[in-house]
Amino acid sequence: MRALAYFGKGDIHFTNSLAEPKELGPDELRLSIAYTGICGTDLHEATSEPIFFPKDGHRHEISNNELPQAMGHEMAGIVTEIGPAVTKFKVGDHVTVEPTGTCRDRYRWPDSPNANKPKCSACKKGMYNTCAHLGLIGNGVQSGGLAERVVINESHCYKVPAYIPLEVVALIQPIAVSWHAVGVSKYRQGGSVLILGGGPIGLGTILALYGHGCTDIVVSEPAKIRRDLAEKMGATTFDPTLHSSADNVRLLREMAPGGDGFDYCFDCSGIPETLQSSIQCLTFRGTAVNVAMWTIGKPIDFFPMDITKQEKSYAGSMCYTYHDFEEVIDAFEKGLIDPKKAEYMITAKVSLERAFEDGIMRLITRKEETIKVLVTPNNFGELDVDNTTDLLAKL
C-alpha cells in the first residue's frame, strides 16, 4: 500500500509498496485512514536520533516489529472491517486512535519472543501511559496513519460522532495530550493559567482548559501567527520577544489576577527559559506542568528553592490514558470544546505523496507560521499545498 515510511535513521520517504497490515485478530479493526496529523515527535524522529523507533538493525521491544513502518499517530479513520470478538464498533464508524504501545499490547504479537514477558510495574498499576517500554503506533510499535490502512485493537479506538469533521477527529489525540496535562495539574475551576508556547500542544491546552471550565488563560508565544490564533481561540497573549527574561517574568506575573503570579503554568515549549518561567510565574502553592518533549541527554540548571520557598509544585505529564480520550470526545459532544476553534489549528492538508516535502519539511523549516499539517492518505476533501495566506485571512 501507499505510505510515508521510516526506513531507518535519516531515511524517510514515500513508497507504493509497504506491506499491508496483518490479518485481523479477534478484537481488531481495520481502518481506512481519513487524516493523520504530523506531530513534533515525528519531526524529532526525522532530524535526530530515534526516540520511539527502534535503532537500525533492531526490532521493537513490545511488538518485535522491524522497519520499514508507516509513520503517523494522530489518526482519524473509518472502520472497514471488524474481528469476530469486536463489540463496540461496526463498519462505517468514525474513530480516533489512542496510539500507545505498552505491556498490555504484547498479546497482539504472539510470535514475538517478548509476548509472554511480565508487565512492567507501571502497567501492573494501570499507569500504562508511563510504561517502561512505552512506544507509539506509527513510531515503532507498528505502522501508523501515514498509510492507507491500519489494523489496531478495539481497546485503542474511540467512536466519534459523524457530525464532528474528520479533520477535527485527527486533532483529538494531541488534545488528549493536553487534557491529560490539565488532569496532572489537578486544575480547579477559577484557577488562573499561563501557557508557555503557542504551538499545537499549547493551542490544544487552551481547548482542554475550556473543557475543564477554565476561562482565564494567558499564552506567551514569540510567533505572531500563533499569538493571533490563541487570541482567536479566546486567550490573552504575551510577546516574550519584546522584553528581557527578567522583565518577562515580572510582566507575566502582573497579568495574573491579583498581579502575583498564576495558579497553573503549562510549559509547552521545552526549553530552559520556559522551564524557569513556568516556575517563576507561579503564585504560592501554584503548579507547573511540563508537557513538552525535551531533547534527550541535555540537562539544565534547576534550583529547588525556586519551588520550595512558596511551596510550589512541578510535575511532568506523559501521553494520555483512555479516560482522556473519552473525556475529550465528551467535551466535544457537550459543546465545551468548539470544533470550529479546533479547526484553527489546521494550517494545511496535503497528500500522502507530498507528506514529507509539504508536511515534515514545512514544519521543520517554517515552524513559526505552521501549526498542524494533516495528511490524507485516501484523498479526503480539498488539499492545500500552502494555505498560510488563507489562514491569516481567516484571522
Image (cartoon, helix red, strand yellow):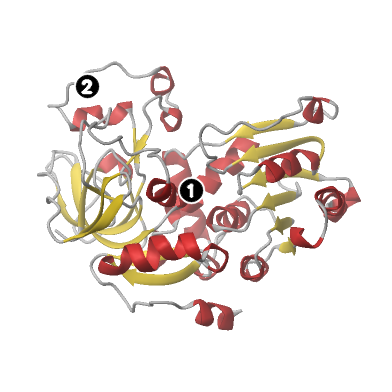
Q: Which of 181 and 196 is in front in this view?
A: 196
Residue 162 seen in render? no
Answer with the quarter of the image where residue 126 lies: top left
Q: Nearer the viewer, residue 247 or 214?
A: 247
Q: Residue 365 at x, y = what percent?
A: 49, 63
Q: Residue 223 at x, y = what percent?
A: 65, 65
- Label pair 2/1, CB-CB below 8 angstroms: no
Give the SS element for disc 2. Answer: loop
Which mark is on residue 114? 2
Question: Image check: 234 left or right of 165?
Answer: right
| Category of crowding for the residue at label 1, using alpha-carbon neighbours closer than 10 angstroms: few (below 14), some (14–19), many (at least 20) | many
Q: Which residue is drawn at 19% across and 43% down?
A: 28
Answer with the quarter of the image where residue 260 lies: top right
Which mark is on residue 323? none
Q: Which of 393 and 215 is in front in this view?
A: 393
Which mark is on residue 176? 1
Q: Return the disc, 2 or 1, that comes first in the chain's sequence.
A: 2
Kindly report the distance in space between the C-alpha atoms of the residues bearing marks 2 and 1: 29 Å
| Category of crowding for the residue at label 2, using alpha-carbon neighbours closer than 10 angstroms: few (below 14), some (14–19), many (at least 20) | some
Answer with the quarter of the image where residue 270 lies: top right
Q: Residue 171 at x, y = what percent?
A: 44, 58
Q: Which residue is drawn at 57% across and 83% down?
A: 393
Please, is residue 103 above or below residue 353 in the view? Answer: above
Give the SS element for disc 1. Answer: helix
Q: Which residue is drawn at 51% across and 82% down?
A: 390
Residue 72 seen in render? yes
Q: Residue 200 at x, y = what percent?
A: 53, 57
Instruction: Give the amino acid at mark 2.
Output: Asn
Question: Image check: 139 left or right of 80?
Answer: right
Question: Image check: 107 left or right of 300?
Answer: left
Instruction: Give the amino acid at mark 1.
Output: Ala
Q: Which quarter shows the N terminus?
A: bottom left
